[in-house]
Amino acid sequence: MATTPHDADMAERCADCGRETPHAVSVEILTESEKPENVAFSREPYRVSECQVCGATTKIRMNNA
C-alpha cells in the first residue's frame, strides 16, 4: 500500500547498475511481525526505491525506534 497516488521518478545511485539511474520512489506501510496477535502494532513506514533501468528494489525503514 503506497501512501502516494503515484511514484515520482528521481535519479539515485543503483547498487546493481553501479551508476545514477532514474528510480521510482514511494513510501509504504509494511507489517514486520508475522504473529497475528502483533500485526496491528508492527506496521512501520518504509522508503521503497525501484531502479527503472534494472528493476532492483531497495526498502529502508524510516522509523528506527
Image (cartoon, rainbow, N blue to C red):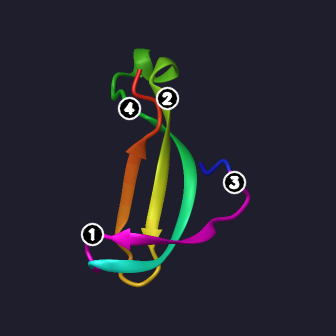
Cα–Cα span, label 3 and label 1:
24 Å
Q: CA distance from mark 1 to mark 2?
A: 27 Å
Q: Hey, what amino acid is under mark 1? A: Ala
| Range of magenta residues | 4-17
* Looking at the image, residue 21 lies above or below residue 56: below
- Going by the picture, which residue comes out furthest to the bottom? 53
Kindly check if marks 3 and 4 are in contact, taking CB atoms under 8 A apart as contact: no
Which-is-in-front pick, marks 1 and 4? 1
Q: Which residue is mark 4?
A: 32
Vertical comparison of 65 with 22: above or below: above
| Direction from residue 45 to residue 14 in the image, left or right | left
Q: Residues within 10 Å of mark 2 (few under 14, many from 20)?
A: some
Identify which residue is drawn at 56% across, 70% down.
10
Q: Secondary structure at mark 2?
A: strand
In this view, the residue farthest toward the right is 5
Q: Nearer the viewer, mark 2 or mark 3?
A: 3
**Residue to which mark 1 is pinned:** 15
Would you call the spot at circle 3 few (<14 residues within 10 Å), some (14-19), or many (20 or more)? few
Q: Earlier in the sequence, mark 2 or mark 3?
A: 3
- Marks 2 and 4 close (CB-CB < 8 Å): yes
Q: Kindly identify the amino acid type of the residue bearing the numbered disc 4.
A: Glu
Tags 1 and 4 touching, CB below 8 Å: no
Find disc 3 in the rendering and name its residue: 4
Residue plotted at (40% across, 78% down): 20
- Looking at marks 3 and 1 on the same chain, the residue that comes earlier in the sequence is marked by 3
The answer for how far apart the CA atoms under marks 1 and 4 are is 24 Å
Q: Tell me the distance, in whole angstroms, between the alpha carbons under discs 2 and 4.
A: 6 Å
Q: Is residue 5 above or below residue 36?
A: below
Secondary element type, mark 1: loop
